[in-house]
Image (cartoon, rainbow, N blue to C red):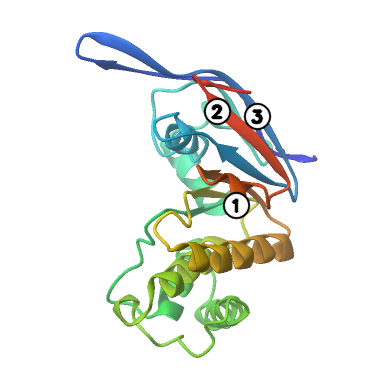
Amino acid sequence: MNEVLSVRDLRRSFVQGGQTIEVLRGVDLHVARGEIVALVGPSGSGKSTMLQAVGLLEGGFEGSIRIAGEEAAKLDNDGRTRLRRDAMGFVYQFHHLLPDFTAAENVVLPQLIHGADRAPAEARAAALLTTLGLGHRLTHKPAQLSGGEQQRVAVARALANRPALVLADEPTGNLDEATADIVLAEFLRLVRGEGSSALVATHNERLAGRMDRVVRLHDGVLV
């Protein structure tokens, strides 16, 4: 199977003030194994809504979403939770690290939830963080890290369980330009090194151009 993600005729609408607003109007998208795709569009174009759909984080969607060969529509809540846990990693604009845990512990925890033993989970966390230039910050808590360092920990956490697909929603949107360049370069290098695929929502055309392919969301469809 060459496709990690296959989306067909994805639709999502909201009722607001008595009016129906169509955010996604029949989106088709395919992401191949090992491919990194930029999802570009201005604020309010539906990028986050699409990532929420693909990430199985919210209901109310119509259409087909196949992740690592599994059709999400055929899964119950437990099945969708399992698919998120086993096949996907997530990076958000804000790192959402657990403040009372160290950098290493933030990367160990999802592995333990996934069923890994502590020793290999700790070794995996240390290896990922060292690859991201944080080998000297393993025991630091988020409040002791810079914004760029916090986001690197979030990237390591997303890759901890070797997901088939990484979803990133404006992963550098909260960073200054120089730090954003560094974090994105490390993100791309790590995703490629791990053999994962990624769908990255961004409004930054310059950063999008560094990915394998760019698709644009406009008026609820990809163009």
Residue carrying label 3: 29
Question: Nearer the observer, disc 1 or disc 2?
Answer: 1
User: Local crowd at mark 2 within 10 Å, few (<14), some, or many (≥20)?
Assistant: some
Q: Amino acid at mark 3?
A: Leu
The answer to whether the residue labelled 2 contacts the one labelled 3, judged by CB atoms less than 8 Å apart, is no
Q: Tell me the element at label 3.
A: strand
User: Local crowd at mark 1 within 10 Å, few (<14), some, or many (≥20)?
Assistant: some
Q: Is residue 34 above or below residue 24?
A: below
Question: Which quadrant would residue 193 be assigned to in this image?
Answer: bottom right
How far apart in space, not on screen, are marks 1 and 2 (Cα)? 16 Å
Q: Residue at x 47, y 57 (%)?
A: 172
Q: Residue at x 51, y 67 (%)?
A: 178
Q: Residue at x 50, y 20 (%)?
A: 220
Q: Tell me the element at label 2.
A: strand
The answer to whether the residue labelled 3 contacts the one labelled 1, judged by CB atoms less than 8 Å apart, is no
Image coords of residue 157 (percent x, y) = 49, 66
Q: As drawn, is 134 to the left or to the right of 185?
A: left
Image coords of residue 116 (percent x, y) = 54, 70
How far apart in space, not on screen, are marks 2 and 3 (Cα)? 11 Å
Of mark 1 and mark 2, the one earlier in the sequence is 1
Q: Is residue 183 above or below residue 222?
A: below
Residue carrying label 1: 207
Residue carrying label 2: 217
